[in-house]
């Protein structure tokens, strides 16, 4: 899988020129004949529309007067040609139009700490992490407390969401799984402060003064202003 460079705000890899069908894909098929009185409505009346034709588990579709057609691995022009071939001798000058509605191979699954987990189609064009999260209703946690985890096969890539929103906004590839995972970033405020406890960071690089502000400052009745200490555990 080749990825384009991460770019601020969104553009990315070009869409695939030819989308190959797979089980679970859905399409709209319109068949029209050259005159009235045939199996399908004439072209002047817009033809006969089959609004939701789905590729079954064997990779085939079924249409009235056409029967079953294997379509797995074909693109839409090839499906149109196969339907026309099947109608030869039974329909007069058949015209076939196929529009792809949903394609699992060209989609991204978005899950985790988002408001509405969803499978997002990429048929409309390139999609970035921010685009996909927006399609899923947005984050349920602060960007400072969330990571975007992009999986494709055995490849796993983790990016803090505050970095994504500040410019490192990767373009997704068809077949990716995007999981927004919670990751606590914060500190423990203990001793003579007005609000002791475990507090979340509210900015990317907080200072000790920022931490004291979150803890509602020192308790004037108990605190010694010369005895404020910062303890940090070194990660192995």
Image (cartoon, grey):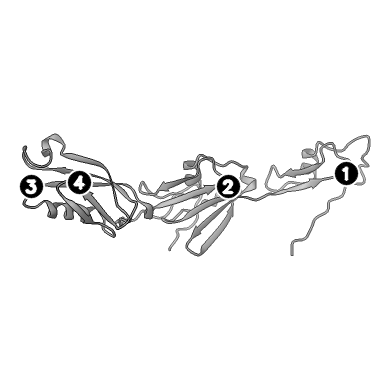
Residue in the picture at 69% in, 49% down: 185
* Residue with the mark numbered 1: 191
Residue 76 drawn at (x, y percent): 24, 52
SS under mark 3: loop
Quadrant (top left/top right/bottom left/bottom right) for the N terminus: bottom left
* Residue with the mark numbered 4: 97
Which one is earlier in the sequence, the residue at label 3 or at label 1?
A: 3
Which one is earlier in the sequence, the residue at label 1 or at label 2?
A: 2
SS under mark 4: strand
Residue in the picture at 87% in, 38% down: 218
Q: CA distance from mark 2 to mark 4?
A: 43 Å
Q: CA distance from mark 4 to mark 1?
A: 72 Å
Circle number at residue 93: 3
Q: Residues within 10 Å of mark 1 (few under 14, many from 20)?
A: some
Above or below: residue 131 compared with residue 175:
above
Above or below: residue 92 compared with residue 36:
below
Which one is earlier in the sequence, the residue at label 4 or at label 1?
A: 4
Q: Residues within 10 Å of mark 2 (few under 14, many from 20)?
A: few
Which circle, 3 or 2, is nearer the viewer? 3
Q: Is residue 162 left or right of residue 88?
A: right
Q: CA distance from mark 1 to mark 2?
A: 35 Å
SS under mark 1: loop
Q: Depth check: 201 or 48 in front?
A: 48
Which one is earlier in the sequence, the residue at label 2 or at label 4?
A: 4
Residue 11 drawn at (x, y percent): 44, 50
Q: Residues within 10 Å of mark 4 (few under 14, many from 20)?
A: some
Residue 40 drawn at (x, y percent): 12, 41
Q: Is residue 109 left or right of residue 33?
A: right
């Amino acid at each position: 899988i080749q990825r384009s460079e991460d770019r601020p705000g969104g553009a990315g890899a070009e869409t695939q020129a030819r989308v190959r069908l797979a089980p679970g894909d859905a399409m709209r098929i319109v068949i029209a004949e050259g005159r009235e009185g045939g199996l399908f409505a004439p072209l002047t009346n817009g033809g006969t529309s089959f609004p939701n034709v789905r590729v079954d588990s064997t990779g085939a579709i079924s249409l009235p007067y056409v029967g079953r057609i294997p379509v797995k691995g074909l693109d839409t022009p090839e499906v149109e040609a196969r339907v026309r071939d099947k109608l030869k001798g039974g329909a007069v000058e058949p015209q076939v139009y196929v529009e792809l509605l949903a394609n699992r191979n060209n989609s991204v699954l978005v899950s985790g700490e988002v408001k509405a987990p969803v499978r997002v189609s990429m048929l409309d064009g390139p999609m970035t992490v921010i685009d996909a999260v927006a399609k899923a209703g947005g984050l349920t946690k602060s960007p400072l407390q969330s990571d975007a985890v992009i999986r494709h096969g055995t490849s796993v890539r983790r990016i803090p969401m505050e970095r994504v929103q500040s410019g490192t906004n990767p373009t997704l590839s068809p077949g990716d799984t995007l999981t927004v995972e919670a990751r606590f970033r914060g500190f423990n405020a203990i001793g003579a402060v007005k609000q002791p406890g475990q507090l979340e960071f509210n900015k990317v690089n907080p200072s000790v003064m920022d931490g004291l502000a979150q803890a509602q400052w020192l308790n004037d009745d108990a605190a010694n202003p010369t005895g404020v200490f910062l303890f940090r555990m070194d990660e192995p």
